[in-house]
Image (cartoon, rainbow, N blue to C red):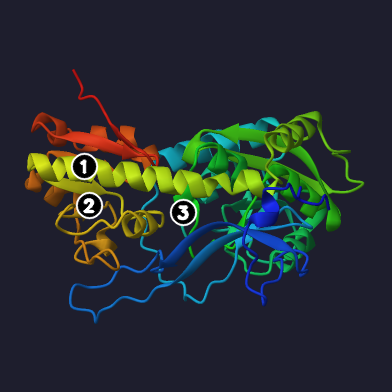
Amino acid sequence: MSDATSTAEATSLPLPDPSWRDRWSGAEGGYVVLDLGDQPPADLFPLPDDPTPDPEHPLRMVIGTGTGLVQLETDPTTPQEPRGVEPAALVAQAEAAVAQAEAAGFVRPGTRVLEYPSPHGGSWVDQLAARDMVEVSEGEAELLVDIFGMMHDADQKAALLERAGHLTDDGVLLMQYHTVAAIVRSGIWNALRHGHFAYYSTPALVEMGKEVGLVAVGAWEYPLYGGTVMLAFAKEGSRFGAQTADVTAMVERELAEGITDPAYVATLGTALSESVAAIEEYLRGTTAEGLVVAGYGAASRTSALLRSAHIEKEQVVAVADASVAKHGRTMPGNRIPIVSPADLVGLRPDRVLLFVPDLLDEVRKALPEIEANGGRWVVLDPMPREVEPVA
């Protein structure tokens, strides 16, 4: 694999815990590029009367110097039962991706498909079934689909080897991921969370594929989460041939940005400081004006943002979410109540902090009462940005 660049600035970056080993190579050698301190598990939503304090654990991002793989340093948490609801933007991306995969010849009626699901949703089962593909849960398949799935595997090499083992000789593995290039470029520091063991750049993932006999034969980009990528992998020597030009162009572009340079990835720390300062300043202003502020989106990225910006119930009275399973629960640490969208409308908030920017169009359409009552949506991406009301 290509070594991550070690610039003069990178040498001053903290080193990971001595027990840390790269989740791909198993080797030592890395830098801590983002440190969020102690954070509650991102999928913990305690009941109001659950014992306090809620558990917190270190949350740090490391880049391996021998692999360029950006990854979670440690994770002592236990995954909770998923309670999320697929946003419309994720469904729309699934439709677009399946259509593009079909146009590329990877989706063919009557062939077998094996899907590696993500706890956050994004399944293609319905779209592929509509194209007469046969879903299987074991054995070989002509199409493997991994939508934000492999990042949840602590042992990255074992996970990719398993996927390669299910692929037929002329099969294709489609992987979608939130590219580190977009995360760093947009300063989305709160993408880091417990349970997400790997954050892929295209150069790192393409090299990982090569090590297990897979070649990248297609690349597509989408705007979801600030920038997601779908790569198509096939076995070396298959009918799909060598690495395609679109993959090479994407790899070269991310390398030119500096995505394997620890110092560049560590600019997420600056983004953290700047966005937290801006959020705290914004909420000081709303408090001074006596405004009622609520939130929307009890998502995995929300806990870290609330904790890092020291947001309490006195500043944000409730967080609404579409997931019925979360209603009546609370956000960890500050115990801000999680309510239904209908309850959010009933609060008649002056401002609603939107913790998942991709939901903006969807929630404005579903909850016109917010703006009709004089309220405004405030997108946290992750800097606060007030949205002008509909004329």
Q: Residue furthest right?
A: 237
**Which residue position is annotated with label 2?**
320
* Tag in front: 3 or 2: 2
The amino acid marked with disc number 1 is Val
The amino acid marked with disc number 3 is Gly
**Which sits earlier in the primary sequence, circle 1 or circle 3?**
3
Distance Cα–Cα, label 1 vs label 2:
9 Å
Label 1 residue SS: strand
Q: Where 28 falls versus 362 (above or below)?
A: below
- The picture places residue 234, in percent across and down from the top left corner, at 80, 47
Label 3 residue SS: loop
Q: Nearer the viewer, residue 223 or 70?
A: 70
Q: Is residue 43 visible?
A: yes
**Which sits earlier in the primary sequence, circle 1 or circle 2?**
2
**Which residue position is annotated with label 3?**
121
Check whether the beta carbons of the residues at disc 1 and disc 2 lie within 8 A of each other. Answer: yes
Q: Which mark is residue 352?
A: 1
Q: Nearer the viewer, residue 225 or 28?
A: 28
**Which sits earlier in the primary sequence, circle 3 or circle 2?**
3
Q: Residue furthest bottom?
A: 51
